[in-house]
Amino acid sequence: MARLATLFVLVPLLELILLIRLGEWIGFLPTVLLVVGTGLLGAFLIRREGLRALLAIQLELARGRLPTRVILDGAAVLVAGVLLMTPGALTDLAGFFLLLPPTRTLVAGWVQARLAVAVARGTVRFATWGASARRGTATPRPGGAGQWEGSPRSDAGSPVGLGGAGAPRDTEAGPRPPRPGEIIQE
């Protein structure tokens, strides 16, 4: 939490100082045009790279492979877009670097390694879900302990939404299966 607070205070402060210095150095109007221009160029690049990532995901799925690396690549494009739409020199620079395929590959590898360490330590677990023949039931898959199939339902029969890390794991009837998309932290 302290890291996020520092990030949300320190980065805008640095951006403001940089924009003021840049305005003193090249002038007010060129600074404004530079910020607007990088935003427009960033939007164009995000669209192009985002479409590439989407096509790569479809290609991997068509080949019958899980597109984990490609999804991380697409997430990097999304983060780059957020950085480029944020006014400022540092965020624009970080966003443009993140749009470059070699940089995205490095970042995706770093994220994948961090997730692997977290999974190995047991601080993060992933649950997978499949389609069930009977709608509204959560049944274990044959031969797979802890793997559940179907759409989970609450006791009242209404669909259960996506759960967060703080969702209760046990009910009066006993432990429940993980919800679709839920990341379990212990």
Image (cartoon, rainbow, N blue to C red):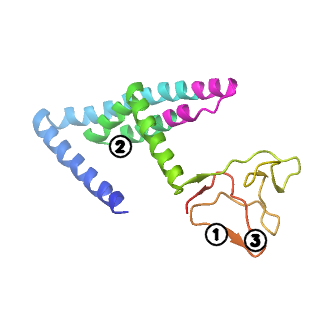
137 and 21: which is toward the camera = 137
Disc with the residue nearer the chain's start (1 vs 3): 1
Of discs 2 and 3, which sits in the foreground? 3
| 172 to 80, vertically: above or below | below
Residue 135 in the magenta stretch? The answer is no
Q: Residues within 10 Å of mark 2 (few under 14, many from 20)?
A: some
Magenta stretch: helix, strand or loop mostly: helix
- Which residue bears the numbered disc 2? 86
Residue at label 1? 168
- Measure how far apart labels 2 and 3 are at the Cα level: 47 Å
- Amino acid bearing label 1: Pro
| Distance Cα–Cα, label 1 vs label 3 | 11 Å
Q: Point out the residue furthest to the left here.
A: 25
In the displayed structure, 1 sits above or below 76; it is below
Q: Which residue is mark 3?
A: 174
Residue visible at 10% across and 35% down in the picture? 25
Picture coordinates of residue 97 (x, y %)? 34, 31
| Residue positioned 66% across, 67% down in the render | 169
SS category of the residue bearing label 2: loop
Q: Which residues are magenta?
A: 55-73
